Image (cartoon, rainbow, N blue to C red):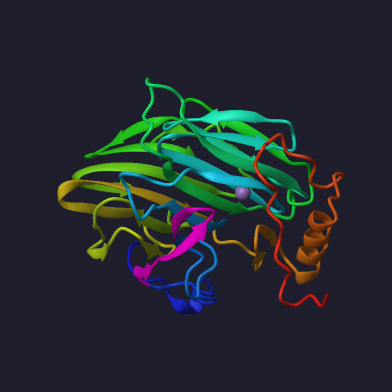
Amino acid sequence: MSGPVDASDGLVGGGRVATIEVREGRTARIGAMDVLRVLPTKGRRTVGAWCFVDLMSPEDIDNPPPLEVGPHPHIGLSTVTWLFSGSALHSDSLGTEQLIRPGQLNLMSAGQGIAHAELGVDAGPAHDTEGVMGAQMWLAQTDATRHGPSGFVHIADVPRVESGEAVVTVLVGEHGGETSPAATDHPTVGLDVHLNRSTRIEIRPDFEYGVVPIDRPISVDGVIGEPGSLVLVPIGHESLALDARSDRARMMIVGGAPLDSRIQMWWNFVARSRDEITAAWRDWRDHNDDRFGPVPSELARIEAPVPPWVEV
Ligand code: MN
């Protein structure tokens, strides 16, 4: 089946789309770095369990500012870090210090609380030093894991599969018979696709998807998304026709089973209620090391703003 899903089946609604739709991203600022935020977007918080997709997007692409994000907390989400260029040092309150380079994946699950820092580093002449570019994405954790312990894994070899005229790197989940070692608690897929002209890729009809063009416009079943936009694909499709329009193009594809609970997101926290977020905000403000712990980093700690619903 492809095309619109019957709205009467209860799977459409709540901000979900019945046909393929394009949403524009917006520029946001993290430290000295501009990012393109494609999710959340207007009227849409999640694609599967994906609740946050940022592309590092410096204004001056030839001379990007250094990546320096000091210690800050998370709850209730897993971060997926995937670089296009440059190298970065990840440090967290589990004591992890891990260098990440293009082609490698960092998956950090916050559970009830973690803190981390990210620092762009010069990894030497064998690696490009053109500045850190890449994607930082979050997955909302489910009730089964979001109150549990935090964790971090670095995956040096991410599986890759040829799929027609595309080379697909499987960051999360399964595609074309290849499964990522990155474990998630909800049916999820995350792909980095290098497309040569056009191809048709198989997708799961029980998943919803977002296609994120990175460097060139992409046609998704005839709907064109520009870099910096999000092409939303509703459940019900068994394949997608991807067309780089007589060129090579790179895109991220995120997808998964729609979440069955509505998430609350504020600052670096993902929860189900404001009370949960307020408690996490207070624990970070009060340096509750039982929850978030110190981070081995020289960078300055990032203080949380006051949630707008909290009276101080
Ligand atoms: Mn973070």
Picture residue at 47% right of the left edge, 39% below the top: 171
Picture residue at 37% right of the left edge, 20% below the top: 126
Answer left or right for 146 relative to 251: right
Q: Nearer the viewer, residue 294 or 249?
A: 294
The x, y position of residue 10, in whole percent, is: 54, 75
Q: Which residues are magenta?
A: 19-36
Classify 121 as above or below 223: above
The x, y position of residue 32, in whole percent, is: 49, 53
The x, y position of residue 201, in whole percent, is: 31, 47
Q: Nearer the viewer, residue 228 or 168?
A: 228
Picture residue at 58% right of the left edge, 41% below the top: 118
Picture residue at 25% right of the left edge, 54% below the top: 241
Q: Nearer the viewer, residue 280 or 260?
A: 280
Quadrant of the image for the C terminus? Answer: bottom right
Classify 5 as above or below 39: below
Give the prevailing secondary structure in the magenta stretch.
strand
Quadrant of the image for the N terminus? Answer: bottom left
Q: Is residue 249 visible?
A: yes
Answer left or right for 299 relative to 218: right
109 drawn magenta: no
**What is the count of numbered marks?**
0
Answer left or right for 257 relative to 211: right
